[in-house]
Image (cartoon, helix red, strand yellow):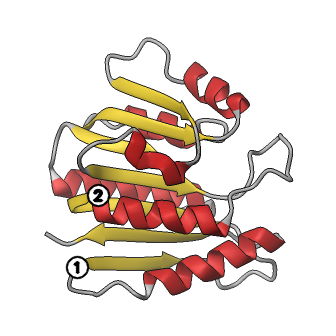
Amino acid sequence: MLSRNMTENLHLLIEQHLKMWGKQNLTAMDGTLGNGHDLEFLHRQNQVQHLYGFDVQQQALDASGAKIVGTNKEVRLILDSHHNLEHYIEGEIDLALFNLGYLPGADKSIVTHTETTLVALEKVMDKLSDGGLLAVMTYPGHEEGRKEHEHIEAFLTTYHVREYSILHLNVKNVKKACPNCFLIIRKS
């Protein structure tokens, strides 16, 4: 059942995709660690065995690492921008999640930027396995977030429907800018 919280809806949709897909031993990526909630979610998925997390703030790596202690999965938390992912991830990516914006509870002047986010998304889409899923949460409620959202939306329209299914989820019956979710699935 869908919730009023877009992140909860996103997690539910990812779980359903993983069940229907049936693939195991997945490589997953959290492109924006933040406080570690998405990394923790990805880590809980039984199908995920290799997990990479990126952030430019040590605080994010520390918070995220604290959520997944004692794991038997391969986990790499990387203090670097997501647009440098090819230096750390060889081969295909099966599942990637980007929750853009700023680190909640930290310096709001440190945000994801349109230019590097678009580079990272293009690299992930090139590395996405057949049936793989890329999920992107945008937050158009602040200036850089609005710019980032608009550019991502335009960027995604350049991909052909024969290669990718691209869904855009948002809430229409609210007055303020709310989070948007893009789900990109590479077709087999």
In which quadrant is the N terminus drawn?
Answer: bottom left
Q: Position of residue 85 (x, y in %)?
A: 44, 47
The circle drawn on residue 127 is 2
In which quadrant is the C terminus drawn?
Answer: bottom left
The residue located at (65%, 23%) in the rendering is 62
User: In the rendered structure, which amino acid carries the disc numbered 1?
Assistant: Glu
The residue at the far front in this view is: 87
User: In the rendered structure, which amino acid carries the disc numbered 2?
Assistant: Lys
The residue at the far top in this view is: 70
The circle drawn on residue 163 is 1
Element type at marker 2?
helix
Q: Give the crowd class for mark 2: few <14, some 14-19, many >=20 residues within 10 Å.
A: some
The residue located at (53%, 50%) in the rendering is 82
Q: Earlier in the sequence, mark 1 or mark 2?
A: 2
Q: Position of residue 56 (x, y in %)?
A: 66, 41
Q: Which of the two residues, 184 or 160, is positioned nearer the viewer here?
A: 160
The residue located at (45%, 81%) in the rendering is 156
The residue located at (43%, 88%) in the rendering is 157
Element type at marker 1?
loop
